[in-house]
Amino acid sequence: MKARDYTPLMAKLAETYAQRSPRSKAMQDQAVNYLVDGGSHTLRLIKPFPPRIASARGAWLTDEDGHRIMDLWQGHMANILGHNPPEITTPLAEALGGSFGLQTGFTDALQVDTARILCQQTGAERVRFTTSGSLATMYAIMLGRAFTGRELVLKVGGGWHGSQPWALKGIDYHGGVGNGYQAVESNGVPAAVTDQVLVTPFNDPERLRDLFRASGDQMACFIMEPFIGVGGYMPASPEFVRTARELTQQYGVVLILDEVIAGFRFRAGNMGALYGIQPDLATFGKIIGGGMPVAAVAGRAEIMELAGVSEGGSRAYKAARVKFSGGTYSAHPASMLAARTMMAYLVDHEAEIYPRLGKLGDLARRTVRDAFAAEGIYAHVTGGSGMLSDGNAPLTTGSSMFMLHFPFDPDRPLVSPSDCFDPARCDIPLCHTVLDLAMLVEDVFMLHSHAGLSTAHTEADIAYLGEACRRAARRIKPYL
């Protein structure tokens, strides 16, 4: 389908936004004198300028211009309890007000407690903490390569595993190149690294089998998200996950589940358990940190021990060492306090939190879809757990995640990133550029149409979201 020209609409939206947010605009004008593009995280620097946030509580933000904005981004989907939840901020404030929290550079009981909870809730045997999801996935891949002595890394097209060398291939859709996900997405990455990365389609068990038959004995690891994030917000099918587990075991390949998004989002633990499988390694982040910079690699002891320094007789100790030594702020005490508090709270309240979030997610997806439909625009909303079925019963209590797409053909399903990001299938600018700004002028914050609900969101908030979608749709409709 011919691409639509949204230039006039974007100019009008930008003018409206600038008029109502002069302080944020002035701060952006100042920021670009000191910061690259005005900030330190590219995704947050929306055009024409990002809102500068003065405070945040629960489901809502307040910007420097005094607008109350309902937030669906929620700290990159990390804030499952909302912004600054008292369950986390109170113990942090008490600790920092005493003599605990900034004594960086030592070990303490908190790290042990936090690791114990993560192991118990995920089935992992050992954990090592770091500070970001990118580092966690990088270390997991290094461990997989060292453990197997092989070089090839397999990932899913459209999967995002952070800004690290083995992850910067096959992120964005490029039609006509292989399966659309074969390009390297960054300069400065050695070809010797990216040439060792193979890319397979999401939710395609047959293509996965073909790849393993061709290269399985050369593969070190297969890293995949059980719930793909930037690739379209959709769960992996049970067949795909179970096929991945069977093939990796058959060929001696390390299976890494990247649960930086999925971990503790659908249950108080790992999402892999919902499929009935145990990966060799898993990576966690976002929710487990309670709003602080915490990430982790967790998994089988014989693989994780490759990061250790002790001498022993296991296979792992005889294999090559992995310099997963940690950084200055790994297992930072204040971060460990937030992580232990968050995970313990989710475990203790699992029975009430996740069913409610699932129901709220169902309501939000339905409300958003109906709001656009009422204005004559078809919106497909991914993120539900409908695909998570073994043919008999759902495997989760529901999903609190969703993402909007605008397919040209409502009758063709969206089941993989290539469906969602093929410009012949979906209106990509509308989904990932226009809608964000149209919603922001209606005081709803989204990025690339992503949304993750928190326990702080209410049914009244969802009703507000529906009305905002209708108003945004009325702004958009004349340009379709």
Image: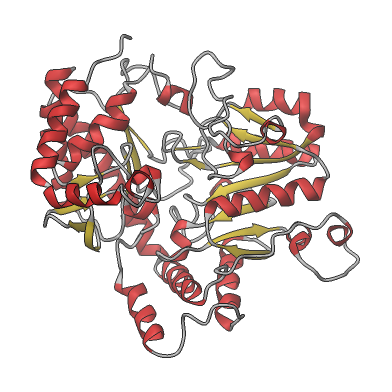
Quadrant of image for the N terminus: top left
Colour scheme used in the picture? Answer: secondary structure
Position in image of residue 234 (x %, y %): 44, 37
Where 214 falls versus 291 (above or below)? above
Instruction: Say left or right for 449 vs 480.
Output: right
Q: Does 44 sit above or below residue 60?
A: above
In depth, the one of 232 and 368 nearer the eye is: 232
Residue 309 appears in view:
yes
Residue 213 drawn at (x, y percent) = 77, 25
The x and y percentages for residue 97 are: 36, 87
- For this orientation, the residue located farthest to the front is 33
Question: In this rendering, would 195 be left or right of 39?
Answer: right
Inspect this view and state whether residue 374 appears. no
Residue 65 lies, in percent from the top left, at: 12, 54
In the image, 292 versus 456, the foreground residue is 292
Identified at 53% across, 45% down, the residue is 162
Residue at 51% x, 40% y: name it. 160
Say which quadrant the C terminus sits in.
top left
Residue drawn at point x = 61 percent, y = 53 percent: 282
Total number of numbered discs in the rendering: 0
Judged from this view, the residue extending furthest toward the bottom is 98
In this view, the residue in front, 48 or 73, is: 48
Residue appearing at x 12%, y 54% in the figure: 67
